[in-house]
Each structure stands twice: as C-alpha cells, then as structure tokens.
Amino acid sequence: MVKILGIETSCDETAASVITDEGEGEARILSNVVLSQLDEHRPYGGVVPEIAARSHLDHIDRIVDEAMDEAGVSFAELDGIAATGGPGLIGGVIVGVMTAKAIALTHKLPFIAVNHLEGHALTVRLTDQVAFPYLLLLVSGGHCQILAVEGVGKYKRLGTTIDDALGEAFDKSAKLLGLGYPGGPHVEKAAAKATNPARFKLPSPMKGKPGCDFSFSGLKTAVRQAAEALPPGPFKEEDLNDLCASFQMAAADSLINRCKNAIKMFKADYPEGNTLVVAGGVAANQTIRTQLTGMCEKQNMRMVAPPLKLCTDNGAMIAWAGLEAFKAGKIDDLTFAPRPRWPL
Ligand code: KG4
Ligand code: ZN
C-alpha cells in the first residue's frame, strides 16, 4: 500500500491531503484539508500575490498537521511527499515546495514535484475509473486548454486560449457587474435565477472557426457593453440575472463548439478513445457540465468531471498526481526549483 502527502499552495488555497492507493474512488482520500484565503483577498477583488505567500507561510504547518492527524498517519508511514512545483504564484509555490522538501529531508522520504495542471488532469482517475488515453478540457482561473492525456506525464496539447482563461472571464465579468470574488460561483448563482437567459445576444467566441483554440476576452467586453447599455444607476437584479445567464450560455456554447472539433482531432489519433474529462475550477459550473454531457452523448463520448469539491484547488489532486508519478518511478531531486511557468 502506498501513502502520499500532497501540498497545494500555488494560488489562494493552503491545502494538504493524504492519499492511499488502497480501496476504491474517494475512499482513498484519507484526509483533505483546504484553507481558503478568500476573505483576505476579497477586499481587493482578486488574489494579491504577497498576501497569498505570507498567508501560506502562516498556515502551512498547521494544515499539514491537520491532514496527517485526520488521516491517522505518521510521517514515518508515508511513502513520499508531493507538492505543487508550479505553475502558479511563485511566493506560494516556494512555501509549499520548501515545506515538502523539509519533511522529505527530515524523514528520508522521496519528494515529488507535481505540475498543478497535472493535478487537475488526473483527479478523475482518483474518483472514477478512467483509463488512458482521454481528452481533457482544462478550464480554470489561469488556464484554458484541450489536451490528449496519453499517460502520466504524457500530454499532447490540441488547443489553448489566445487571450483570457474562462475562469478569468467569469471573474472579470463578475467584477464589472459588482458581484463578488471569485466570480464563477456568483455568476452561476445569479444565472440560476434568470427569467430570460437568452435576452442578451452575446457572441460565442471562436464558434465555427477550425481547430480548438479559445478566446474569451471579447465575451467579457460584450458583457461590459451590455451592462453599459442598461439604465443608469444600480443594476436591477433581474437584469443582472439575465446577463449572467446569457454570459454562461455563450461561454458554454463556445466550449461545446471547440470540444466538438477537439473530439474529431482526438478520435483521428485514438479511435478507441471515448472519454472527455472536464477539470479545473470552472468544471464546478453545473450549466457547463450539463451542456457538455449533452454534447458528449451526441458524439458517442462519455463525459466525466470530478465531484464539485475536487474541481477547485485542493491537496488531494496533488497527492493523487504525486502517487501516480511515484508509482511510475518519477521522483524529484531536492534541487528542484519552483516554476512560475510550467506548461504541460
Ligand atoms: O482551478 P481553480 O480553483 O484555480 C486555478 O487553478 O485557477 O479555478 C478557479 C477558477 C476561478 O476563476 C473561479 O471563478 C472559477 O474557477 N470557478 C467557477 C465556478 N467555481 C469556480 N467558474 C464557473 N462556475 C463555477 N461554479
Ligand atoms: Zn487549479
């Protein structure tokens, strides 16, 4: 039986988790402790890197202790320590990597540097039975990509955003509408109350274009223009709800169009491939999940997304990716340098 501690500090969650390879699905998560820094960043309408780094430093030891206590495991019983090695806000990544290295050195354990995106990419193999190869739509606050996942550490990028990530478009649109941070959940909540989701005619970016790249900055601009065309003064709730729903529909429509092209490209390379995995924070959006599931049914594909709490950043995804890497013999040296940028 293998047991791995995973540490995640690349953005605004200080998180630690212990994972084992024994058992099935989420029963393999022995603990998963996530401390969100949202309250510290909310006044600024976004993540402030210096505040994030300091807060990770203040809390990481306690969060690791909590994860170990909850799992009922001592450091000596672990097989390895994994930490997000990038990409992300470098101050936070350094805190996580240094903590993991210190534990690894003290307890003579292997250290595994995990690519944060690989954490999102492999989470479905923890929660569901998903075999390689699969098609991955990775939609988070910092990334928006479609990849063929061939194995641990084996990725082929089919498409990416040419400007904003989708989570970023959710966050920026929410900000300009006076909704809170992070924008995704606020936009989703407002959209659920809409009476006329088709009221605002917003563009579905890249729809009809060949390939499977994305673009979301034009959609964000269209939201701003639609908001500016509303009567002056504070937004009426029904206008806000309809606008959020129209935005979500346009975003989902664009994703569907891009994914259809990606499925064709994927199937040309892997005729046996039949799974689309949706991961990253935006995969928590119910409308987007439902729309993608419907599209997959028509394309003879299966859509799999992690449970909502494992879509946004957490330690379990890093521990799991670390466990997969460990089993594949991929261990890092303690000289590993944290990477602000680290494409898959
Ligand atoms: O994966 P994640 O936690 O962090 C990154 O690696 O970026 O993703 C955070 C992003 C934010 O942009 C947030 O607004 C978005 O995921 N998000 C959502 C929802 N929940 C989080 N977007 C749409 N609908 C949601 N329910
Ligand atoms: Zn993430």
Image: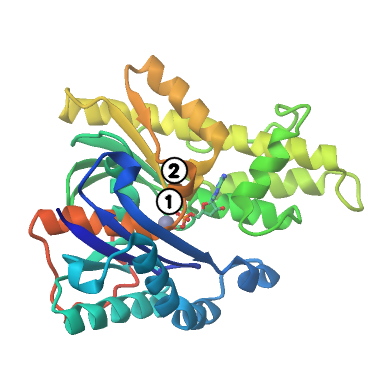
| Residue shown at the point (20%, 56%) measured from the top left | 323
Q: In this view, does 309 lie above or below 36?
A: above
Circle 2: element type: loop
Earlier sequence position, callout 1 versus callout 2:
1
Residue 119: image location, x then y, percent: 31, 54
- Between the residue at mark 1 and the residue at mark 2, the CA separation in whole angstroms equals 6 Å
Amino acid type, callout 1: Ile
Ligand 2 image position (quadrant): bottom left
Residue 1: image location, x then y, percent: 14, 53
- Can residue 63 be seen from the camera position used here? yes
Tell me: 35 left or right of 94.
Answer: right
Question: Does the CB distance between marks 1 and 2 fall below 8 Å?
Answer: yes
| Residue shown at the point (65%, 59%) measured from the top left | 181
From the image, which quarter does the C terminus lie in? bottom left
- Check disc 2 and report the residue beneath it: 214
Tell me: 195 left or right of 133.
Answer: right
Residue 338: image location, x then y, percent: 28, 76
| Residue shown at the point (44%, 62%) measured from the top left | 33
- Check disc 1 and report the residue beneath it: 162
Q: Which of 47 and 232 is in front in this view?
A: 47
Check disc 2: other Cα within 10 Å, few if <14, some if 14-19, many if 20+. Answer: many
Amino acid type, callout 2: Phe
